[in-house]
Amino acid sequence: MKLGILSDTHGSLFYFKKAFNYLKDVDRIIHLGDYLYHGPRNPLPEGYNPMKLAELLKNFKKRTFITGNCDSPIDLKLVNIPEPTPYVVESYGPYNFFFTHGWDPNLEDSISLAKKYKCQYLIHGHTHISKYKEQNGLIIINPGSVSIPKENTPHSILIIDILENKINFKFIDIIKDEIYKHIYY
């Protein structure tokens, strides 16, 4: 199973198309929110075209879409999400994932829920900063932002390869067209 994780496209058709070069061969796309609107604290990203991006996003069949803080009810309808989804728990083989946008600045609520659902991985967006860390027996991952990265992190996505007894995390810089972090388990 191969998962393609992205977050914070903020209406950029340009950066989404760059990300999609890596996503077209995955088994499932997971978007962690902030699909169309750039938000009041962010500049307009290059290639800002939320209408066209909405058309592309709504047609994905094998997907999990989480609601972000910049996603309005009309945005959700445009990308074919019937109701807000603050988090989702999914299992792939022996691995349990807690997917959320990550509005809680310290992720305490998300960490508690991930542990309640016996998840090994908490994957979130929101900060626009890619990261990988272990905290209290939980692996916390942020793929970064596709369109508006912060703190000198790249425009990025995450590819997760799930094998029978092994899992690989590949952080991909979609502009440099390279893996910039690769973690094996």
Image (tube, rainbow, N blue to C red):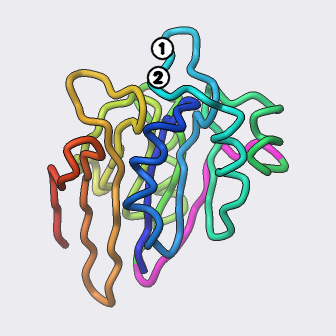
| For residue 79, side relative to residue 184 (left or right) | right
- Mark 2 burial class by Cα count in 10 Å: few <14, some 14-19, many 20+: some
Quadrant for the N terminus in the image: bottom left
Q: Horizontal and vertical percent for residue 15?
A: 43, 39
Q: Nearer the viewer, residue 114 or 89?
A: 89
Kind of residue at disc 1: Asn
* CB atoms of marks 1 and 2 within 8 Å: yes
Residue range of the region highlighted in magenta in the rendering: 83-94
Instruction: For marks 1 and 2, give the one nearer the viewer.
Output: 2
98 inside magenta stretch? no
Q: Is residue 111 visible?
A: no
Residue pushed farthest bottom? Answer: 164
Residue 168 visible from this viewpoint: yes
The disc at residue 42 is 1
Please give the name of the residue rendered at 39% of the width and 36% of the height, measured from the top-left corner: 145
Based on the picture, tell me whether residue 84 belongs to the magenta stretch: yes
The residue at which mark 2 appears reads as 45
Task: Name the side, left or right, on which 166 lies relative to 157.
Answer: left
Q: Is residue 45 above or below residue 40?
A: below
Is 86 rendered above or below residue 20? above
Q: Nearer the viewer, residue 114 or 185?
A: 185
Q: x%, y% of residue 55? A: 72, 47
Crowding at label 1, few (<14), some or many (≥20) Cα neighbours within 10 Å? few
Return the x and y of residue 73 as percentages of the image width and height. Answer: 81, 32
Distance from the alpha carbon under mark 1 to that under mark 2: 8 Å
For this rendering, which residue is in front, 78 or 117? 78
